[in-house]
């Protein structure tokens, strides 16, 4: 069953601040001062990293019982490399992440082999991870001038 998720991002008057809305939720996006922002919120690429970790955590929580896994705590550390010279137009290099690395941390008494299998399941099941790993078709659905 194909489900469509929606979000709206609106540039605010203050610097590079963007208000992002989806369903009944709102959050801000900004850039660090070093990139011309006011540094009051995560940057878009930091949000992307957080979305990956959040998705992995949700998959772990949602499917632990079905896999007979118990854990007290879970968190993911995520980092990625971007060549900012491409974003700033100073070099002809890719503007997006060149590599994203993550480490999943579980506080559990489960055996390592069982947890490695569960981590492989999380990697196969996380929609954000799948989108990043396998790419997703980006379609410009139009331009509206108001």
Image (cartoon, rainbow, N blue to C red):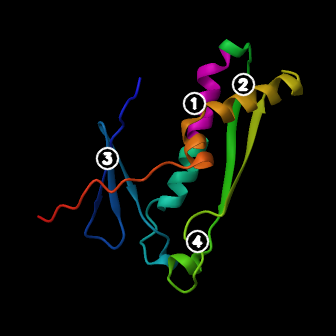
Question: In screen coordinates, is 112 left or right of 55?
Answer: right
Give coordinates of residue 106: x percent, y percent: 76, 32
Residue at image position (67%, 19%) is: 64
71, above or below 96, in the image: above
Disc with the residue nearer the chain's start (2 vs 1): 1
Looking at marks 4 and 3 on the same chain, the residue that comes earlier in the sequence is marked by 3
Q: Is residue 45 left or right of residue 2?
A: right
Residue 42 is at least partly visible in this image: no
Q: CA distance from mark 4 to mark 1?
A: 30 Å
Q: Dividing the picture into quarters, in which one does residue 29 lie?
A: bottom left
56 or 142: nearer the viewer: 142
Where residue 71 sits in the image (x, y, percent)?
73, 23
Badge number at residue 21: 3
At 42% across and 71% down in the image, what residue appears? 38
Q: Residues within 10 Å of mark 4 (few under 14, many from 20)?
A: few
| Distance in Å between CA atoms under marks 2 and 1 | 14 Å
Q: Is label 2 in contact with label 3 (beta carbons under 8 Å)? A: no
Predominant secondary structure in magenta? helix
Residue appearing at x 66%, y 13% in the figure: 66
Q: Residue beneath label 2, please?
A: 72
Of tags 2 and 3, the one toward the viewer is 3
Work out whether residue 11 or residue 14 is closer to the camera in this orientation and state it. 11
The first of marks 2 and 3 along the sequence is: 3
Which callout, 4 or 2, points at the residue further toward the start of the chain? 2
Magenta residues, as a range? Answer: 54-65
Check the picture and name the quadrant holding the N terminus.
Answer: top left
98 or 74, nearer to the observer: 98
Q: Can see residue 39?
A: yes
* Disc ID at residue 58: 1
Question: Which residue does the numbered mark 4 point to in the structure image?
Answer: 94
């Amino acid at each position: 069953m194909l489900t469509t998720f929606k979000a709206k991002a609106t540039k605010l008057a203050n610097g590079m601040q963007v208000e992002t809305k989806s369903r009944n939720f709102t959050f801000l996006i900004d850039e660090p001062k070093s990139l011309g922002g006011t540094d009051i919120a995560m940057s878009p690429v930091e949000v992307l990293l957080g979305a990956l970790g959040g998705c992995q955590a949700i998959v772990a929580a949602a499917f632990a019982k079905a896999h007979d896994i118990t854990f007290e705590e879970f968190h993911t550390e995520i980092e990625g490399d971007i060549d900012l010279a491409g974003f700033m137009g100073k070099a002809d290099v890719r503007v997006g992440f060149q590599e994203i690395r993550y480490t999943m941390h579980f506080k559990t008494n489960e055996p390592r082999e069982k947890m490695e299998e569960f981590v492989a399941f999380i990697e196969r099941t996380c929609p954000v991870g799948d989108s990043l790993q396998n790419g997703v078709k980006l379609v410009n659905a139009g331009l509206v001038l108001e």
